Image: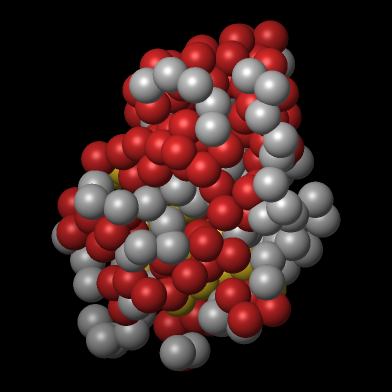
Amino acid sequence: MAEREVQAVVFDLDGVLVDSEQQWDEVRRGVAVEAGRAWPDGATRALQGMSTPEWAAYLTDVIGVPGRPQDVAAQVIDRMASRYRSRLPLLPGAVQVVQRLALHWPLGLASSSPRQLIDAVLESANLASKFRVTVSTEEVRAGKPSPAVYEEVVRRLGVDAQQAVAIEDSSNGLRSAAQAGLRVIAVPTKAFPPDKDALSLASVVVHALDDITPPLVTSLSDRS
């Protein structure tokens, strides 16, 4: 086996498989507005990739939403779950890319969503059986851009980080995967495009999930 041969693929969830970044933003802003708190410039980007305890603390400590962080988190997550029950916002090609790559590699999921929402999405999309490992940033020491969630996924998959490829969209996600040592395929979103320095960490940039094929992933074996 070549030292750099791809042995696993790790997906992000929000912004990669589900079109949820805008919904997270709307729900969190709604909670702040209801509490009479202004939404600071930069808050949306700062929150992307944070674990549940981190973003809940941000809402209470930085934005000033009253209440205990765990109670604010529960409120936000319940509202997100309600939206998912109403309509699961899968991105075009999400189911197909997972099915396509699962035929060739074990798959992992490294998500900032809480476990409750990860499981709800994968079950509703009939994709749960395709993932060998799923990890929420709730379950590691820190959220993205910390590499912790990717480090835990590859550990559970039993592969070296340099033998894994991540699929990410956001600045903090790209930084997290790259810092963990994975090669990264970037799928930028128009609503929340990644910073240029974060995008530069990707081995390849694609414009749609349909562009992510087994030959493309295999080609990353020869890239740093």
Q: Which of the image's four quarters has the N terminus?
A: bottom left
Residue drawn at the location 57% of the way across and 54% of the way down = 46
Instruction: Name which residue lies at 70% across and 39% down.
Output: 39
x and y percentages locating residue 219 in the rendered image: 53, 81
Direction right: furthest residue: 190
- Judge from the rendering whether residue 83 lies leftward or rightward of residue 137; answer left or right: right
x, y percentage for residue 121? 52, 25
Instruction: Tell which of 170 and 124 is nearer to you.
Output: 170
Viewer-proximal residue among 163 and 23: 23
| Location of residue 171 with respect to 96 vertically, above or below | below
Q: Answer with left or right where residue 128 lies relative to residue 63.
A: left
Q: Nearer the viewer, residue 182 or 172?
A: 172
Q: From the top left corner, tell me how far across and down residue 97 is, in percent.
A: 60, 48
Q: Residue at x 45, y 48 (%)?
A: 50
Give the quadrant of residue 133.
top left
Residue 97 in view, yes or no: no
Q: Is residue 197 above or below residue 74?
A: below
Using the rendered image of the protein, determine whether residue 180 is visible from the camera's viewpoint.
yes
- How many marks do you count on the picture? 0
Spot occupied by residue 151 in the image (x, y as percentages of width and height): 26, 62
Quadrant of the image for the C terminus?
bottom left
